[in-house]
Structures are given as structure tokens and as C-alpha cells.
Amino acid sequence: MKVILLEDVKSLGKKGDLVTVNDGHARNYIIPKKLGLEATPKNMNDYKLKKAHEEKVAAEKLAEAKSLGTELEKSVITVGIKVGEGGRAFGSVSSKEISEAIKQQLGYDIDKKKIVLKDAIKAMGEFVVKIKLHPQVQSELKVKVVEGK
């Protein structure tokens, strides 16, 4: 029996593969556990349409991430930090504060987990912060740390 795999199955194949298996294995294991579908013409067509739609959505998300990345690279955000005597900073600027500043100043809602900081920013000045917008798109944003708060 020919089966379209809906999940990766060890020793059979990857998701989306068309494989030939014994009838009993297909009826008793693969189909009941929703690991695959019988490869009827209708199921083949439905799967192709679904896959085409998923590829289209993925391409749109990639294009959206690229355009957002170019916008962020042109932008500079300002974050305030408490400063004591001699220009010494109290505390630091974290990815959460940078995320909130992006939302307030630029209007983009970026998750703090996507902002890559090697260490928290503990000084005033301009810093370049990397932001992972998509597995294939990484952007840089200038963050200007000033006295304030």
C-alpha cells in the first residue's frame, strides 16, 4: 500500500514522502496513529495543495521579516538608564527594555527572546544589537543609551 507520511517515521521516511509499506503496517500502525494517509488521488491532491499553501505562507513571512529587517537597520532607538556620580551607570539595559523601547518608539512588537545580547549594556553610548527576525533573517539595530529614567 502506498502511504503519504504526515510525520517523520523512523526507518520509513520524512514528512511528505510517498512510501510503500505492507497493508497491515499501514492499517494497524501508520494510519491509526495519524502518521500517514493512504495515497488515494484525492489525498495526494489535498496534500499537494496544503503543501503549496504552506510554502506560500512561509515565503510571505520571510519577505515580511526581510522588510522589517531593513526598517530596523535604518532606525535608532533611545533607552534611558540611571546614572550616578561621575557618569557611572546603575543597573543595565536588558533585552526586555530594548523590546519595550522598540514598541514605543518604532511601533514594532518584537519578542525579547529574539534580541541577541552577549552581555547586558552597562554603559552610555551607541551599541549595535542583533535581532533574529526569522531563521534566515538577522538584522541589526542601533541602540543609543542615554542618561534618564
Image (cartoon, helix red, strand yellow):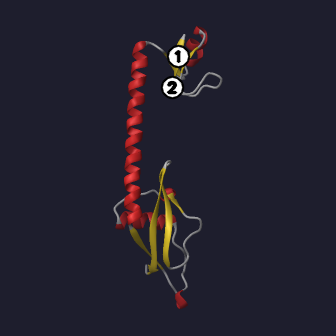
Residue 10 spot, x, y in % from top left: 64, 26
Residue 87 spot, x, y in % from top left: 52, 87
* Mark 2, secondary structure of its residue: loop
Question: Badge 1 local density, few (<14 within 10 Å), some, or many (20+)?
Answer: many
Residue 87 vs 144, above or below: the answer is: below
Q: Amino acid at mark 1?
A: Val
Left or right: where does residue 20 sit relative to residue 60? right
What residue sits right under mark 2 in the picture? 16
Q: Residue furthest right?
A: 11
Who comes first in sequence, dot 2 or dot 1? 1
> Which image quadrant for residue 30?
top right
Left or right: where does residue 90 sit relative to residue 41? right
> Which sits in the foreground, 11 or 31?
11
Residue 37 spot, x, y in % from top left: 49, 18
Quarter of the image containing the C terminus?
Answer: bottom left
Q: Residue furthest bottom?
A: 86
